[in-house]
């Protein structure tokens, strides 16, 4: 038969259980922050490319091990600070912006090409005395 625990013994056992759980959670949180610090550039680049090119699926560069932390898209979005939302909102305006900018770009390109070709074939001018 099991001996009944006194209230003090129950409190002590609950305290040790909570301390162990808190230590485990702290270790997991530290591992997550360490992962973010080590891979922040890759995560940001992945978030930006996913926002610009949503149809492309990039293959993971490193294999996930059982002890490595896994991150959901919400955590990556929180890391980016919502930058991905701005890219997805303005993505549908890109074709319109290109239609507007195309005549200006062509004009500037043609003028630059004319100037370059003119400078290549033009001889040095002789000074008149």
Image (cartoon, rainbow, N blue to C red):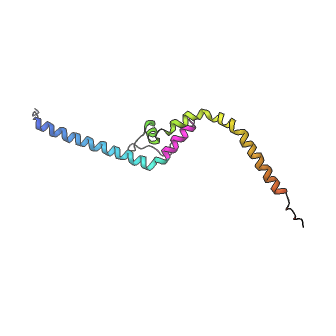
From the viewer's perspective, is 51 left or right of 33? right
Residue drawn at x 85%, y 57% as measured from the top left: 122
From the viewer's perspective, is 60 left or right of 15? right
Q: Position of residue 103 (x, y in %)?
A: 73, 39
Which residue is most to the right?
129
Q: Position of residue 8 (x, y in %)?
A: 11, 38
Q: Is residue 114 visible?
A: yes
Q: Is residue 58 visible?
A: no
From the viewer's perspective, is 26 left or right of 57? left
Is 49 a magenta residue?
A: yes
Q: Nearer the viewer, residue 117 or 127?
A: 127
Q: Quadrant of the N terminus?
A: top left
Q: Nearer the viewer, residue 50 or 13?
A: 50
Vertical position of residue 126 compared to residue 92: above or below: below
Tell me where the magenta segment starts and ends, as one range.
42-64
Is 1 a magenta residue?
A: no
State how many labels appear: 0
Which residue is most to the bottom?
129
From the viewer's perspective, is 92 left or right of 9? right
Residue drawn at x 59%, y 35% as measured from the top left: 91
Q: Position of residue 67 (x, y in %)?
A: 38, 44
Q: Nearer the viewer, residue 116 or 17?
A: 116
Q: Quadrant of the C terminus?
A: bottom right
Q: Position of residue 120 (x, y in %)?
A: 81, 57
């Amino acid at each position: 038969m099991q001996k009944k625990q006194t209230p003090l013994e129950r409190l002590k056992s609950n305290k040790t259980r909570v301390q162990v759980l808190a230590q485990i959670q702290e270790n997991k949180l530290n591992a997550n922050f360490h992962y973010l610090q080590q891979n922040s550039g890759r995560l940001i680049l992945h978030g930006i490319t996913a926002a610009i090119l949503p149809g492309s699926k990039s293959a993971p560069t490193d294999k996930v091990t059982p002890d490595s932390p896994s991150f959901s898209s919400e955590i990556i979005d929180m890391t980016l600070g919502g930058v991905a939302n701005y890219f997805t909102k303005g993505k549908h305006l890109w074709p319109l912006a290109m239609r507007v900018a195309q005549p200006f770009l062509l004009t500037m390109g043609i003028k630059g090409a004319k100037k370059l070709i003119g400078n290549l074939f033009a001889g040095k001018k002789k000074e008149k005395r």
